[in-house]
Image (cartoon, rainbow, N blue to C red):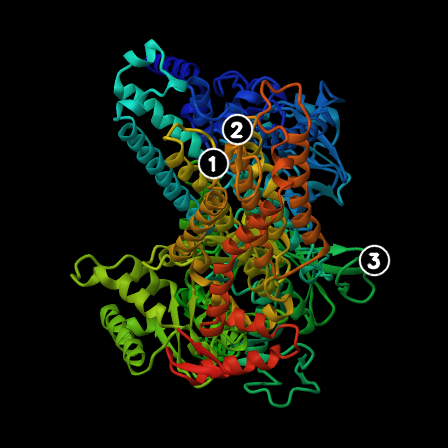
């Protein structure tokens, strides 16, 4: 009775709390059939339908939601407050001046986001309404995809896409398997094999499938594409049968059925709970250094704005302290204004001044920056030099927010396999008990041509050796997950298995496995196929051997090995295991370990990838124990991975070593050239790999990461076993610091062949000790700092035997160091995703290990060699362009608003605007916006070819050099100077005024009617021409588009001013600008004054640049001086030689120009 109450209490709590909220598993009833009475309680759970929603908005929530998102941006919210202040209180400028630019920005953004969301709605509807086939009451019916429910049995034909996440029940193939491509999910185009539940694979018609009575218990939805834990309970006539379910039974939404006529499967995750939908979630937002500088500048200008408003408010009340000035006859206060408290009046005046000066904050800058980043990213996509014709792939931009960050990279963290190397494996040799075998050189005991020069070759092994040799070859033919694809014609590598058979080739998720199986074919043992749970191989005598595949202990990056358990035709069972030497040698109890270890180390030094092979015969009792351990772990719903790992650890022990293999992974084309260029650019390159130290080191030498004169420092387990970690760290620290003290070292050391460079090699185990030091050691707290100090003085670092998480830890460690350098991580596999997400910029390689890295990256490139142009050209240009854009925007707004500030001293601080409303509104939107946008898209301060030839130019823009506070202050001071020249130049040119006969004010020296609007228009005209010509002077790369936009903007301003003041507009209450512009231009002295003031404004900047370039030119400016003369290559060579030969800080002359390198 107590149990009944307990069950009832459990059911009530489930119902009240909701299944999803408290439990981490779900129960799915196949075909919506209740389980038999007495087996388990039937609890109908509520699951979402199969509707996919990738859109953000609906028709009803678009306006409020979009407005909320846009006004979360500080600049938009600030201008909204200013606009509301203008509406509430009496301010000197019309609310239109703030409202119209804000409305323009908000509207453009909303239209863009609304259109993008409409496209998403359209795509969602196309997917949700596509037809699917479902088995109901023994018949196949059609329904829309969105109406699919969890528990429905789905019928899928060949080449159809799976409508949701499914568990495979049966297929048209006799063995219950089906082939699937997951290219849309992870980019892997190879055919993967999935398996039906053993007890249901015989059900192949609608009626048979409809008769299945079973429930599935599985985990709640989670986004990992490669992990699934569940079990199926099948109710037969006898007791229920439980079978484990894993990722090999799970068909994912978006994958496509191939080479299989049809399948039946049950829906377990639908709609937004499918793994594909869960992977839609956006990654953590990364912010560039430029954006951070921009926000810092914005804060400074906000402080300047507030200071201006406070100063003017204070001066106004000081001015009005004189009763004669308090209430002039033309502006007497009302009674309510007189009675208002002085604090309220002062606060109102403060807000009015804030409104008057608010244009110093450039709201349109954010829109321009967004457009520049979005449009600029297409230059990477369109770059034909970054197109890989072999793959047919171009570079991909997943986020355009980090374009300029590509020009600021200081550290590159790269994977080795598939990134530096081709991940195109070629079997080189194998070693069995010390005897070396090479395909097509030694075969069947015959030494073939080309065998000369091989050491440790035995061409006539004895009977025992022969038996072990064949056992080794069989082990490699059986211990893998390779599939055989048999076709008459195929588009890829064609490989005949043996004569008389159709053309076939091997496919696998691991290129290593394909290379090993193909290598065995060269040595006389050919893997044929897996059929009905039996693996077939063809031996040297052309006899087919059959082995029953009992268990597969899959590979994982923690164990670094995989195993299979097979039974031969005599009934004997074997465990065959292959893996990294560090994962196999500790588990070996016999075999010729020393001979094999020596060969493994020899091959590693040669840069070959090595694997060790071992086996263990299993008695019936041992096999029963293994089955018991595995079945218990596989049926677990909680901690299945942990329990499987423990079971594998118990099974893979007491092994007998057979031998080792060596596979070559060649360097990618121009990988060495790319790394050398990055070194010259001042970028430190770290290689993070899971490979052996010797293999990785050989690759580093081949790729020119290490040079012959590089002094290698080792921080490895082998060394820390000989002396404590503390002593090793301090020894290495003394070594690098002593060298650092004897000669001045900097990044320039990599330019000189005579400079001593250090290269550090560290392994995963030692890194763990450095990251998590022993707390008992009082000095251990400094380990990280000492390690970082060593790394700072090394030109290159190799981290080997690294787990994926350790890669991310390394990146995070460097990011958090006191210099806060900009980091870039590049890789091609799932094990690189963690470091790609951790780095400031993540780049994925479109390699052979799937597309996980590409999907999680900020940018994707086909080959490692394309990184050179990505950083040295595109990154350089993006940074130069956006730096000028940001500084220019602040500069032109200082020029715009500072005259308004000065004007208050001449109008009794009455908040009288200097410019007309139209000019206030259109200055940033129309008159000055297009030239800087175009500049930020196409400017090339140095020719692209020169940037590629001389990577040292990248150093000129390092460490955010163009957005330093000194540069920012220079631009601000320049803006203030220009504003003073414009204001006081116009003021003094028109300071002598007389009244004409009709009462108008006229200047005696220009005979021009003159008032405050004429004065403001004159200042504004000089302002627009000055800031536009300033940009023209900064432009190095002229095209017809530049000419059209720059001169077109000036013509547009003149035409607009003529129309605005030349027509009586019916929608205006007053026409204060009528005839003002034309009256101003009718005066000859006005033309002269405009030219003089523009020249006076631009002259100091021009003079400063001339003097600086003559006395202290940067490398970039030297190149610009000599560009176009054909003299550039010689200049580059001479600059490089001078830099290498001279001590840092010394001066030298280049064609009479003094140069100082600092």
Residue 599 in percent (x, y) is at 49, 79
The residue at which mark 2 appears reads as 97
| Element class at badge 3 | loop
SS at badge 2:
helix
Q: Label 3 belongs to which residue?
A: 489
Q: Position of residue 937 (x, y in %)?
A: 62, 52
Query: 54 left or right of 85?
Result: right
Evaluate if marks 3 and 2 touch, with contact meaning CB atoms under 8 Å apart: no
Label 2 vs 1, first from the N-terminus? 2
Q: Which residue is mark 1?
A: 359
| Residue 883 horizontal/vertical position (percent) | 50, 53
Q: CA distance from mark 3 to mark 2?
A: 70 Å
Q: Nearer the viewer, mark 1 or mark 3?
A: 1
Discs 2, 1 touching: Cβ within 8 Å: yes
Does residue 270 appear anywhere in the picture?
no
Residue 506 location (% of width, % of height): 70, 59
Horizontally, residue 978 falls left or right of residue 180, namely: left
Q: Which residue is farthest top?
A: 335
């Amino acid at each position: 009775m107590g149990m009944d109450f307990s069950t009832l209490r459990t059911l009530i709590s489930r119902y009240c709390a909701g299944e999803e909220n408290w439990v981490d598993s779900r129960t799915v009833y196949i075909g919506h059939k209740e389980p038999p009475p007495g087996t388990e309680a039937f609890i109908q759970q509520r699951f979402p339908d199969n509707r996919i929603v990738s859109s953000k908005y609906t028709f009803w929530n678009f306006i409020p939601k979009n407005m909320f998102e846009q006004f979360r941006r500080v600049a938009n919210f600030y201008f909204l407050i200013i606009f509301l202040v203008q509406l509430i209180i009496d301010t000197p400028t019309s609310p239109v001046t703030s409202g119209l630019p804000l409305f323009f920005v908000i509207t453009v953004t909303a239209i863009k986001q609304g259109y993008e969301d409409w496209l998403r709605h359209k795509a969602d509807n196309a997917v949700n309404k596509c037809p699917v086939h479902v088995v109901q009451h023994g018949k196949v019916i059609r329904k829309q995809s969105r109406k699919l429910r969890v528990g429905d049995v789905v019928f899928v034909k060949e080449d159809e896409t799976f409508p949701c996440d499914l568990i495979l029940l049966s297929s048209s193939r006799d063995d219950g398997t089906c082939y699937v491509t997951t290219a849309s999910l992870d980019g892997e185009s190879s055919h993967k094999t999935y398996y039906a539940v053993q007890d249901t694979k015989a059900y192949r018609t609608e009626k048979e499938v409809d008769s299945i009575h079973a429930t599935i218990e599985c985990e709640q939805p989670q986004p990992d594409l490669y992990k699934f834990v569940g079990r199926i309970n099948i109710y037969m006539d006898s007791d229920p049968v439980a079978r484990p379910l894993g990722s090999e039974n799970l068909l994912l939404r978006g994958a496509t059925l191939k080479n299989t006529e049809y399948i039946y499967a049950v829906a377990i995750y639908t709609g937004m709970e499918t793994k594909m939908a869960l992977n839609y979630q956006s990654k953590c937002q990364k912010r560039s250094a430029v954006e951070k500088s921009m926000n810092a500048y914005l804060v400074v200008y906000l402080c300047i704005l507030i200071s201006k408003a406070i100063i003017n408010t204070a001066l106004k009340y000081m001015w009005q302290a004189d009763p004669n000035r308090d209430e002039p006859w033309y502006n007497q206060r009302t009674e309510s204004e007189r009675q208002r408290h002085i604090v309220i009046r002062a606060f109102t005046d403060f807000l009015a001044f804030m409104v008057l000066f608010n244009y110093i904050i450039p709201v349109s800058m954010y829109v321009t920056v967004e457009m520049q980043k979005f449009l600029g990213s297409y230059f990477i996509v369109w770059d034909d030099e970054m197109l890989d014709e072999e793959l047919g792939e171009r570079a991909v931009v997943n986020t355009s927010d980090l374009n300029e960050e590509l020009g600021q990279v200081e550290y590159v963290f790269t994977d080795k396999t598939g990134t530096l190397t081709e991940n195109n494996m070629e079997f080189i040799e194998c070693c069995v008990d010390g005897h070396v075998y090479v395909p097509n050189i030694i075969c069947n005991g015959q030494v073939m041509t080309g065998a000369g020069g091989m050491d440790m070759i035995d061409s006539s092994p004895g009977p025992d050796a022969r038996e072990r040799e064949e056992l080794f070859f069989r082990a490699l033919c059986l211990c893998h997950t390779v599939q055989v694809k048999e076709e008459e014609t195929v588009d890829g590598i064609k490989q005949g298995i043996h004569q008389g058979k159709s053309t076939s080739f091997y496919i696998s998720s691991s290129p290593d496995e394909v290379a090993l199986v193909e290598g065995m074919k060269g040595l006389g043992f050919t893997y044929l196929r897996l059929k009905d749970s039996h693996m077939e191989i063809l031996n040297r005598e052309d006899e087919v051997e059959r082995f029953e595949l009992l268990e597969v202990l899959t590979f994982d990056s923690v164990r670094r090995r995989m195993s299979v358990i097979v039974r031969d035709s005599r009934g004997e069972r074997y465990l065959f295991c292959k893996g990294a030497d560090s994962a196999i040698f500790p588990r070996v109890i016999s075999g010729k370990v020393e001979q094999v270890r020596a060969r493994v180390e020899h091959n590693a030094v040669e840069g070959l990838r090595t694997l060790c092979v071992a086996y263990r015969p299993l008695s019936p009792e041992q096999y029963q124990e293994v089955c018991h351990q595995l079945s218990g772990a596989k049926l677990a719903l909680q901690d299945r991975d942990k329990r499987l790992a423990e079971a594998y650890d118990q099974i893979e022990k007491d092994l007998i070593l057979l031998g080792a293999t060596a596979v070559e992974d060649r360097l990618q084309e121009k990988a060495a050239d790319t790394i050398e260029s990055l070194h010259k650019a001042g970028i430190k390159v770290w290689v993070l790999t899971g490979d052996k130290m010797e293999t990785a080191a050989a690759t580093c030498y081949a790729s020119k990461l290490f040079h012959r004169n590089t002094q290698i420092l080792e921080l490895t387990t082998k060394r820390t076993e000989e002396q404590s970690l503390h002593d090793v760290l301090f020894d290495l620290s003394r070594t690098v610091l002593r060298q650092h003290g004897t000669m001045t070292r900097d990044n320039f050391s990599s330019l000189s062949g005579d400079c001593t460079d250090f290269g550090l090699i560290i392994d995963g185990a030692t890194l763990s000790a450095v990251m998590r030091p022993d707390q008992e050691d009082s000095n251990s707290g400094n380990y990280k700092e000492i390690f970082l100090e060593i790394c700072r003085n090394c030109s290159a670092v190799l981290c080997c035997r690294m787990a994926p998480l350790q890669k991310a830890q390394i990146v995070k460690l460097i990011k958090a160091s006191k210099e806060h350098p900009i980091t870039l991580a590049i890789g091609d596999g799932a094990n690189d995703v963690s470091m790609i997400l951790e780095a400031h910029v993540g780049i994925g390689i479109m390699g052979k290990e799937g597309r996980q890295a590409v999907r999680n990256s900020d940018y994707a490139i086909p080959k490692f060699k394309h990184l050179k142009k990505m950083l040295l050209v595109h990154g350089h240009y993006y940074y130069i362009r956006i730096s000028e854009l940001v500084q220019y925007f602040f500069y032109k707004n200082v020029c715009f608003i500072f005259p308004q500030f000065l004007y208050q001293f001449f109008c009794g601080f009455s908040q009288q605007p200097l410019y007309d409303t139209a000019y206030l509104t259109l200055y940033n939107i129309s008159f000055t916006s297009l030239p800087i946008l175009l500049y930020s898209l196409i400017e090339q301060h140095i020719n692209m070819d020169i940037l590629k030839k001389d990577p040292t130019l990248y150093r000129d823009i390092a460490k955010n050099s163009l957005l330093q506070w000194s540069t920012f202050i220079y631009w601000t001071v320049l803006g203030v100077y220009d504003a003073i020249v414009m204001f006081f130049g116009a003021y003094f040119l028109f300071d002598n005024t007389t009244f004409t006969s009709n009462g108008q004010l006229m200047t005696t020296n220009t005979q021009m009617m003159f008032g405050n609007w004429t004065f403001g228009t004159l200042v504004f005209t000089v302002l627009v021409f000055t800031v536009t010509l300033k940009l023209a002077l900064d432009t190095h790369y002229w095209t017809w588009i530049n000419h059209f936009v720059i001169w077109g903007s000036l013509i547009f301003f003149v035409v607009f001013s003529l129309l605005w003041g030349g027509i009586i507009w019916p929608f205006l209450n007053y026409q204060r600008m009528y005839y003002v512009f034309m009256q101003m231009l009718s005066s000859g002295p006005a033309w002269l004054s405009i030219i003089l003031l523009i020249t006076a404004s631009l002259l100091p900047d021009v003079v400063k640049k001339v003097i600086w370039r003559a006395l202290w030119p940067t490398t970039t400016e030297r190149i610009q001086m000599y560009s176009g003369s054909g003299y550039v290559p010689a200049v580059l060579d001479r600059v490089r030689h001078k830099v290498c030969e001279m001590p840092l800080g010394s001066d030298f002359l280049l064609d009479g120009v003094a140069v100082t390198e600092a």
